[in-house]
Amino acid sequence: MVIMGIDPGFAIMGFGIINYRGNRFYTMEYGVLKTPASMLLPERLLHIEKGIVALIDKYKPEAISVEDLYFNTNTKTAIKVGQGRGVALLCAARAGIPVYEYTPLQVKQGVTGYGRADKSQVQYMVKVLLGLSETPKPDDAADALAIAICHAHSCTNLYKTRKIY
């Protein structure tokens, strides 16, 4: 199963694409989509859309997993991240790909077995599970891979996941 994990963002959106086959993980690609601050808001959203569509067309994921948003301090940041996330969800819907949403706690639990793991523990397990020689960088890409791994571990128990499309 090809799974695309997305760490929602506006200036930087992380993505990670894995193939989960026979209880083994294979890394296909990971990285970030960056939108320059010099671009106007609509142009930045279009830039995100083009990047996600290109990844969907190239890898044809069977599922897209995204992290649920939790912001409690900066409303302006939350709105911008939500706009970028909305573009990602729209791309998935247009391609007919089901989208699954996970809280940060679920991602940590799904990757490390401990819902209160810190970032370094999650990144270490991403590296180990994917058989990588180094921790994926930047952090947004590592987070997106963790979100994809979480779905792979959860997809056999779909009643536990929250399908949003």
Image (cartoon, rainbow, N blue to C red):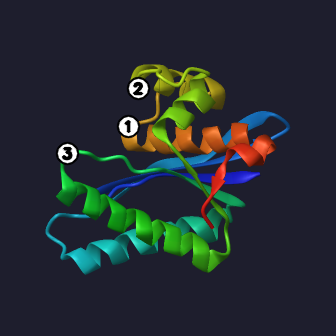
Q: How far apart are marks 3 and 1 (CA)?
A: 21 Å
Crowd band around label 2 with a 10 angstrom C-alpha radius: few (<14), some (14–19), many (20+): few
Secondary structure of the residue carrying tag 3 is loop
Between 48 and 70, the one lying in front of the other is 70
Between 16 and 152, the one lying in front of the other is 152
Q: Which badge, 3 or 2, is on the more N-terminal residue?
A: 3
At label 1, the amino acid type is Asp
Q: In the image, is residue 41 above or below residue 61?
A: below
Crowd band around label 3 with a 10 angstrom C-alpha radius: few (<14), some (14–19), many (20+): few
Mark 3–mark 1 contact, CB under 8 Å? no
Q: Distance between the residues labelled 2 and 1?
A: 9 Å
Mark 3–mark 2 contact, CB under 8 Å? no
Q: Quadrant of the C terminus?
A: bottom right
Which residue is the site of mark 3?
Answer: 73
Which residue is the site of mark 2?
Answer: 119
Residue at (62% x, 32% y) in the render: 110
110 displayed left or right of 134? right
Q: Distance between the residues labelled 3 and 2?
A: 20 Å
Q: Which mark is residue 139?
A: 1
Crowd band around label 1 with a 10 angstrom C-alpha radius: few (<14), some (14–19), many (20+): some
Question: Residue 14: percent from the left, percent from the top?
Answer: 42, 50
